[in-house]
Amino acid sequence: IEYIESYYYNKLEFTRFSSSVGKFVGFTEYGVRNAEYWNSDPSKLSAMRAQKEAYCLNHVPVYYSNA
């Protein structure tokens, strides 16, 4: 299970957080600056890492039981 949060502007992905990587990755110049800023904040990173357990792991059994 992987938690991914992507940020888009004008149909172009500029930043993504992936729980398998554990940090933000930028794909444009603006996205790289955002990723560097967000990766320097330990509370933001720990909150994003906790989203996998808070959202994904609680909802997967519900979705699979309905399928």
Image (cartoon, rainbow, N blue to C red):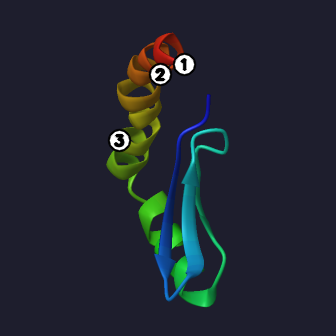
Percent position (x, y) of residue 48? 41, 44
Relative height, residue 30 to residue 14 (above, below):
below
State the residue position of label 1. Answer: 67
Percent position (x, y) of residue 66? 46, 16
Percent position (x, y) of residue 17? 54, 54
Percent position (x, y) of residue 47? 35, 41
Please name the amino acid that badge 2 sits on: Tyr
Of callouts 3 and 1, the N-terminal one: 3
State the residue position of label 2. Answer: 63
Q: Which mark is residue 47?
A: 3
Of callouts 3 and 2, the N-terminal one: 3
Please name the amino acid that badge 3 sits on: Ala
Tell which of 66 and 13 is nearer to you.
Answer: 66
Q: Nearer the viewer, mark 3 or mark 2?
A: 2
Q: Nearer the viewer, mark 3 or mark 1?
A: 1
Crowding at dot 2, Cα within 10 Å, few <14 / some 14-19 / many 20+, comes out as few
